[in-house]
Image (cartoon, grey):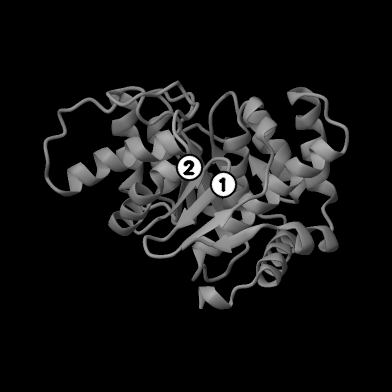
């Protein structure tokens, strides 16, 4: 079936999903980090969704079931927020996990593994995050010793020290073991369900210089998931969300961005202004052999 998905098919699908978000304004509950709240909320609003940044455990059981999708992001992780993340992930709504800096500490890795066990529809991270998470998750699944430190691999905070292609095989294995679609961000974003892989080539390098653009992309995946009644092809939904976000970055640069600050402004404007002709003609998604 993937061989039949031409560039035109992907463009149409991306536009259908973005149009559905604009028409339905899905409520996306983001239990996200302090750094990303602003840009994630503004990206969701620009795309047509309705963001909610609720993190109190006293609210989550009542609030989250009323939402259309959930985004859990562990960037500024604390012991106080972790129960809220778990509760939101367990509320029965489609949800996406962003395992920010998963390999930075044992506490962070254990938190990510506990969330992964709650079966997110999608996990989106950079290559270093996916490599670290896959290493520990697959070792645990094989009943190997978990005493080795998750921070033994090279890491640089929330930044990746690997190319997205470096994590592709681990991403496929992680997808097969968890049932989640795994999205690895980089110069080319790779999205896999464990068997199939698609590459997303939209975006510009300067987006990496804006804090929390990856977090905003994860939130957009949640918004796209929210408008799919029966998410039978979550991989396509995730790929389209990443392509639309990357395309907004391209247009932001073309609109006169001089650096990261002006690109952030132009990116959000571009996301708001995307039209059918632009999306259908400029989305760059293809089957990866």
Corner quadrant of residue 9:
bottom right
For disc 2, the neighbor class at 10 Å (few under 14, some 14 to 19, many from 20) is many
Q: Which mark is residue 214?
A: none
Label 2 belongs to which residue?
A: 164
Q: Mark 1–mark 2 contact, CB under 8 Å? A: yes
* Residue occupying the far front of the picture: 289
> Closest to the observer: 43 or 139?
139
x and y, in percent, of residue 62 in the image: 50, 46
Judged left or right of residue 242, residue 59 is left
* Residue occupying the far right of the picture: 256
Residue at 69% x, 52% y: name it.
Answer: 244
For disc 1, the neighbor class at 10 Å (few under 14, some 14 to 19, many from 20) is some
> Closest to the observer: 25 or 76?
76
Mark 1 vs 2, N-terminal side? 2
Task: Give above or below for 123 relative to 100.
Answer: below
Judged left or right of residue 262, residue 206 is left
x and y, in percent, of residue 53 in the image: 60, 35
Work out whether residue 114 can be spotted. no
Corner quadrant of residue 104:
top left
Task: Give above or below for 247 relative to 281.
Answer: above
Judged left or right of residue 23, residue 138 is left
Residue at 27% x, 28% y: name it.
Answer: 150
Judged left or right of residue 224, residue 160 is left
Q: Which mark is residue 188?
A: 1
Q: CA distance from mark 1 to mark 2?
A: 7 Å
Residue at 23% x, 25% y: name it.
Answer: 149
Query: In the rendered picture of this protein, how many numbered marks are placed on residues?
Result: 2
Give the secondary structure at mark 2. Answer: helix
Give the secondary structure at mark 1. Answer: loop
Work out whether residue 81 can be spotted. yes
């Amino acid at each position: 079936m993937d061989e039949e998905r031409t560039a035109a098919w992907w463009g149409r699908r991306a536009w259908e999903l973005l149009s559905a978000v604009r028409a339905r304004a899905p409520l996306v509950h983001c239990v996200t980090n302090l750094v990303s709240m602003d840009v994630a909320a503004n990206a969701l609003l620009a795309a047509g969704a309705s963001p909610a940044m609720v993190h109190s455990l006293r609210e989550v059981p009542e609030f989250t079931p009323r939402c259309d999708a959930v985004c859990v992001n562990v960037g500024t992780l604390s012991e106080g927020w972790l129960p809220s993340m778990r509760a939101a992930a367990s509320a029965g709504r489609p949800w996406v996990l962003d395992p920010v800096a998963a390999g930075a500490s044992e506490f962070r890795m254990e938190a990510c593994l506990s969330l992964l066990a709650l079966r997110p529809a999608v996990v989106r991270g950079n290559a270093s995050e996916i490599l670290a998470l896959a290493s520990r998750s697959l070792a645990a699944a094989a009943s190997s010793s978990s005493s080795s430190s998750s921070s033994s691999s090279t890491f640089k905070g929330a930044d990746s020290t690997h190319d997205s292609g470096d994590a592709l095989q681990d991403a496929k294995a992680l997808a097969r073991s968890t049932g989640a679609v795994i999205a690895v961000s980089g110069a080319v974003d790779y999205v896999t369900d464990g068997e199939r892989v698609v590459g997303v080539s939209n975006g510009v390098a300067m987006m990496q210089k804006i804090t929390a653009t990856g977090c905003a992309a994860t939130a957009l995946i949640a918004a796209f998931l929210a408008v799919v009644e029966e998410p039978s092809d979550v991989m396509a939904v995730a790929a389209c969300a990443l392509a639309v976000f990357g395309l907004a970055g391209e247009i932001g640069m073309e609109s006169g961005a001089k650096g990261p600050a002006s690109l952030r402004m132009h990116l959000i404007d571009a996301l708001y202004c995307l039209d059918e002709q632009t999306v259908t003609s400029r989305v760059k998604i293809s089957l990866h052999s």
